[in-house]
Amino acid sequence: MALAAFCIQLSATSNWGSGAAADGSRYKVSPVGLRRALVASDGSAGEACRWWPAGAGNMQLCVVTPGGRAAFARLRAAYPLLSVALWTAVVSLFLQVLRLPRQIAVRAALAWFVTLLVATATICVTYNAPRALVVLTGRPVTYGALGLWMAIAAMVSSGASGALVVKVKDEERPGA
């Protein structure tokens, strides 16, 4: 679970995917916002908009597509889902180390809940970003950057942690 927590923390603000514009600009999508790296020849560093915290940066990049409010709401849900997953992973780690509660199913379910939260956040970003934002509409967005790989690693490690809790026989605690 420690690995899952570490991976979730990295994925929460890292780039998950990117797409190119006709002018050569690159758009980078993350659970907290969108960054536009401008063409290198114009000498500017780029610009960003963030939906976490709301309204930070150039909000022209974050214009929602007509009829895309629901997709944008789901896109914004990714970061809170990852935050809940991070703290659930930390709680799950402590409960697994302390072997509390005694019921194995509870500890395994908590680990698998982390997997579910991260999977939901992954769907929120990868499925909804192109449907929610005008700048990404009609542009191919390629997912596979560090943030997405860290989310996948978190899903695998938390799922495996839950499976290991079930597989390994719970030993008697001293004094019980």
Image (cartoon, rainbow, N blue to C red):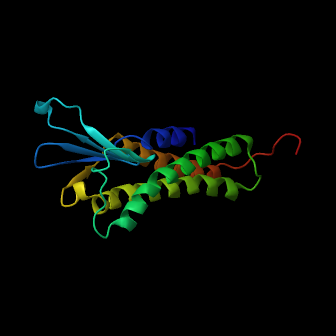
Q: Residue at x 57, y 38 (%)?
A: 2
Q: Residue at x 12, y 32 (%)?
A: 42
148 lies left or right of 65:
right
- Quarter assignment of residue 76: bottom left
Q: Residue at x 37, y 66 (%)?
A: 69
Looking at the picture, tell me which residue is in the foreground, 2 or 79.
79
Looking at the picture, tell me which residue is in the foreground, 126 or 100.
126
- Give how far across and how far down residue 91 sits, in percent: 66, 45
Looking at the picture, tell me which residue is in the foreground, 34 or 151.
34
Q: Is residue 116 above or below residue 168?
A: below
Residue 51 visible in the displayed image: yes
- Give how far across and how far down residue 22 sits, in percent: 10, 49
Q: Going by the picture, which residue comes out furthest to the bottom?
A: 67
138 lies left or right of 165:
left
- Give how far across and how far down residue 37 sits, in percent: 22, 38
Q: Residue at x 76, y 45 (%)?
A: 171
Q: Which quadrant, please, contains the N terminus?
A: top right
Q: Is residue 109 above or below residue 174?
A: below
- Quarter assignment of residue 41: top left
Q: Going by the picture, which residue comes out furthest to the right?
A: 175
Residue 16 visible in the displayed image: no
- Give how far across and how far down residue 19 sits, in percent: 21, 49
